[in-house]
Amino acid sequence: MQKVKMPIEIDPIKSAQKRSDYSGVYLLENLKRLNDITLDKSGVVDVELCCKVDEQGLTVLLVDAQTDVLITCERCGGEMPYHLTFSTVFTPESKKVDEDLVPAEYEIVAVDEFGLINLRDLVEDELILSLPNFPKHEIDDCLISQDAMSWGEIDEQVSTKPNPFDVLKKLKTQKD
């Protein structure tokens, strides 16, 4: 099956009424904010999108996306391959729908003045949120050995130093 480019923007209401399904890709080179974080700008993001109307009458977008990226290991500074994936259910914001009635598993997404959603930015946002805060190789795979991760021996003099609160203890006993 040939992978086609996904639309940048979609009309969620029309797509849901038509029960549209999309399967395609976004080029990583077009995801500027994700490119600022990753090392390799080539590759694609595989995206699956299913648009429908749920039992409550809400417009629903089921989005699945995945890609492989290269990021920097925070421990050794080397390249680290990482598989990014997410699966989320979105519903467009609407004045007709009370946000309190929207199921908790749905994420409310903003629409522009024409009622469109920028799907590419939405996928990019979710991929960025899928990145680990502090990416690190597994200990066995990291370029820095576990022995190099410790920073010296504990100085014996530090542990034999008198407790500064002993002075307070003496004052208390003198008062009694």
Image (tube, rainbow, N blue to C red):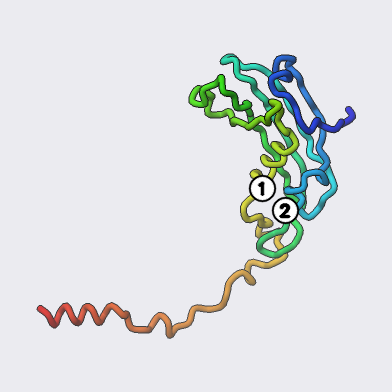
Q: Amino acid at mark 1?
A: Leu
The front one of 160 and 18 is: 18
Count of numbered tags: 2
Tell whether 56 sits left or right of 161: right
Task: Judge depth for marks 1 and 2 and give the one in front.
Answer: 2
Q: Amino acid at mark 2?
A: Ile
Q: Which secondary structure, mark 2?
A: helix
Q: Which secondary structure, mark 1?
A: loop
Q: Do the CB atoms of the residues marked 1 and 2 lie less than 8 Å apart? A: yes
Question: Which residue does the image show at 64% across and 71% down from the upper left?
Answer: 148
Indicate whether 74 appears above or below 169.
Answer: above
Residue 62: x and y in percent read: 68, 26
Q: The C terminus is located in which quarter? A: bottom left
Tell me which numbered mark, 1 or 2, is placed earlier along the sequence.
2
Q: The N terminus is located in which quarter? A: top right
Disc 1 target residue: 131
Between the C-alphas of marks 1 and 2, the distance is 9 Å
| Mark 2 Cα shell of 10 Å, populated few (<14), some (14-19), many (≥20) | some
Classify residue 39 by image quadrant. Answer: bottom right
Residue 155: x and y in percent read: 48, 82
Question: Which residue does the image show at 87% across and 31% down from the upper left?
Answer: 3
Residue 33: x and y in percent read: 73, 48
- Label ID, residue 37: 2
The front one of 2 and 125 is: 125
Question: Which residue does the image show at 66% across and 30% down from the upper left?
Answer: 111
Classify residue 30 by image quadrant. Answer: top right
Indicate whether 124 appears above or below 23.
Answer: below
Residue 61: x and y in percent read: 67, 25
Q: Residue furthest front?
A: 113
Question: Which residue does the image show at 53% across and 25% down from the upper left?
Answer: 103
